[in-house]
Image (cartoon, rainbow, N blue to C red):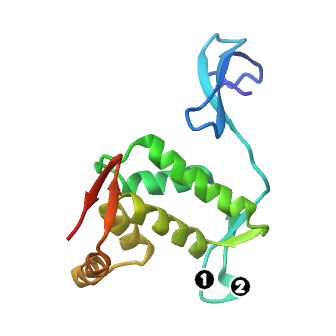
Amino acid sequence: MRCPFCVHDDSQVKDSRPTEDNTSIRRRRQCSSCGARFTTFERVQLREVTVVKSGATENERRRQPFDRAKLEQSVTLACRKRGVSQERIDQLVSGIQRQVETAGESEVASARIGELVMDGLRQIDSVAYIRFASVYRDFSEARDFEEFASTIQEAGGKKEVGAQNVVTD
């Protein structure tokens, strides 16, 4: 593993342990050149998946490798200041990644990933759900927020916020 500080190619593993959700291994490493310590995470990757971005025509569609970090960043941004734990975000992202990798397809539409995120956020926090939807569905006016929020209010029911259950009217 390359050292992020001095870019030396050799490091030693000092400690390994599973993460709390048992979906990855956390490794503490020490560079054999500069002595700096850093942490890496090792996750199972079932298959290489390519994300197909939507475009006006088939020729305009871009393809790029599935990036867990990009997905996690989007979910974290939607959940910012909402009291949703990082553990819950990691569980959601891991679940989406697992669904994408076990679907049996080498390519997945970005719209499919967006829908999986929307489904997950809807169960976790309604505000995070609306935040993500506003970007994903490209809201351009306040009326778009109002219309979307009204569909959530009409659905009613229980919604989980972090580790608490809240009943809406």
- Is the residue 94 above or below the residue 22 in the image? below
Asked which quadrant contains residue 167, the reply is bottom left
Q: What residue type is labelled 2?
A: Asn
Q: Distance between the residues labelled 1 and 2?
A: 8 Å
Q: Where is residue 79 in the image (x, y as percent from the top left)?
A: 36, 53
* Left or right: where 145 falls relative to 4: left
Q: Residues within 10 Å of mark 1 (few under 14, many from 20)?
A: few
Q: How crowded is mark 2: few (under 14 residues within 10 Å), some or many (20 or more)?
A: few
Instruction: Give the quarter of the figure containing the C terminus.
Output: bottom left
* Secondary structure category for the residue under label 2: helix
Instruction: Give the quarter of the figure containing the N terminus.
Output: top right
Give the residue drawn at x 39%, y 54%.
77
Q: Of the numbered discs in the image, which one, if any, rests on residue 55?
A: 1
Q: Position of residue 72 (x, y in %)?
A: 51, 51
Asked which quadrant contains residue 59, the reply is bottom right
Choose between 45 and 19: the one closer to the eye. 19
Residue, disc 2: 59
- Is the residue 156 above or below the residue 165 in the image? below
Q: Position of residue 14 (x, y in %)?
A: 68, 13
* Left or right: where 49 falls relative to 92: right
Choose between 163 and 132: the one closer to the eye. 163
* Left or right: where 138 falls relative to 141: right
Q: Position of residue 128 (x, y in %)?
A: 35, 61
Choose between 143 and 98: the one closer to the eye. 98
Q: What residue type is labelled 1?
A: Gly
Count of marks placed on residues: 2
Asked which quadrant contains residue 23, the reply is top right
Kindly indicate whether the residue at mark 2 contacts the one at mark 1 (C-beta within 8 angstroms): yes
Give the residue drawn at x 53%, y 48%.
91
Q: Of the numbered discs in the image, which one, if any, rests on residue 66?
A: none
